[in-house]
Image (tube, rainbow, N blue to C red):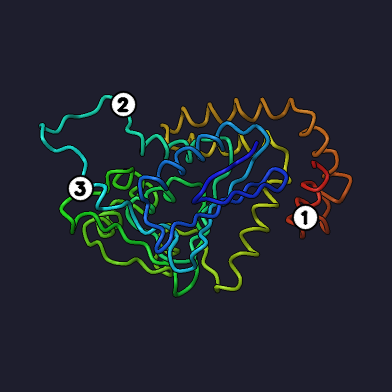
Amino acid sequence: MAYNYDLINVEVEGRLAVATISNPPINIITPPLYAELAALVGELKADPHLTVVVFKSADPDFFLAHFDVSAILTFPTDSPAEKDQELNEYHIMCERVRTMDKVTIAQIEGRVGGGGSEFVSSMDMRFGVVGKTKINQMEVPLGILPGGTGTQRLPRLVGRGRAMEIVLGADDLDAETAERWGYLNRIFGPDEIDNWVMNLARRIASFPVEAVRLGKESVNAAEKPLAEGLLDEAYLFQRLLRNDSAQANMRKFLEIGGQTREGELRVGELNAQLGESSE
């Protein structure tokens, strides 16, 4: 599948796609960039060949600043507010990122705020840079609120009280605190993040496709009531058990030293070998 955009460069490497956003001067989510992000997410969701997508920025200081405030000022206000019966387009984009059968990873080397923070909050993993990554939900000082999933996604990531601080305090959240609170998975030095994230992405992309896809689906089911999530987990396990790749890789695991004392002491290395064998 060809990915052709003006503001996002997409490179595909096997089952892995890397999408690099470039909308100078500060990666504001302007209407044109938003249109491209929404279209790209739709294309990624539909691509049957991918299992991992990494989102990056061409600007080391800004991942996505926030949604264009001048565009928000053009939103209609001449009639009373009404509660929608369906998700709006921004919610749909973020939900596609969260639920698509690809692993979505944000490599946040600089600032991310407002709608940009909401976008990455819906991804499966987020990684940042020590002393450089900053998160800011800047809507409340403007007299509005995070309306693109932020008030619903943040409490699920960091807890209710911390989400209140982020949303209502509207101050910068530094990388170290964001990692401690669970917004960021890990943080790295500026010269370390790219290699680490790409190695993780390639590792996941090397594993059996259905196991990666259904593994994500099962983790997402954790937002359901526990009993319902457990039933989903058991069903997805049974589906994977019947795949040829599962049967082959379990046998391979035993052949290369799994379930031996020496092998289990380096099980991460064994898992990497299984990934290589599944390509």
Say what secondary structure mark 2 lies in. loop
- Pointer 1: what residue? 264
Query: Which residue in the rendered view is the most extreme toward the right?
Result: 255
Cα distance in 3D space between marks 1 and 2 = 49 Å
Q: Residues within 10 Å of mark 3 (few under 14, many from 20)?
A: few
Instruction: Give the mark nearest the N terminus, 3 or 1.
Output: 3
Which quarter of the figure is the C terminus placed in?
top right
Q: Nearer the viewer, residue 231 or 177?
A: 177
Q: Nearer the viewer, mark 2 or mark 3?
A: 3
Q: Nearer the viewer, residue 46 or 52?
A: 46
Horizontal placement of 108 versus 31: left or right? Answer: right
Q: Nearer the viewer, mark 3 or mark 1?
A: 3
Horizontal placement of 38 versus 240: left or right? Answer: left
Residue 50, label in figure:
none
- Pointer 2: what residue? 86
Instruction: Give the mark nearest the N terminus, 2 or 3.
Output: 3
What's the residue type where badge 2 is placed?
Glu
Q: Nearer the viewer, mark 1 or mark 2?
A: 2
Instruction: Give above or below for 175 relative to 166.
Output: below
Instruction: Give above or below for 113 relative to 31.
Output: below
The residue sitting at 27% across, 44% down in the picture is: 147
Q: Label 1 near label 3: C-beta < 8 Å? A: no
What's the residue type where badge 3 is placed?
Leu
- Pointer 3: what residue? 73
The residue sitting at 25% across, 61% down in the picture is: 170
From the top left corner, tell me how far across and down residue 99 is, in percent.
49, 36
The residue sitting at 52% across, 63% down in the picture is: 186
Horizontal placement of 274 versus 83: left or right? Answer: right
Say what secondary structure mark 3 lies in. loop
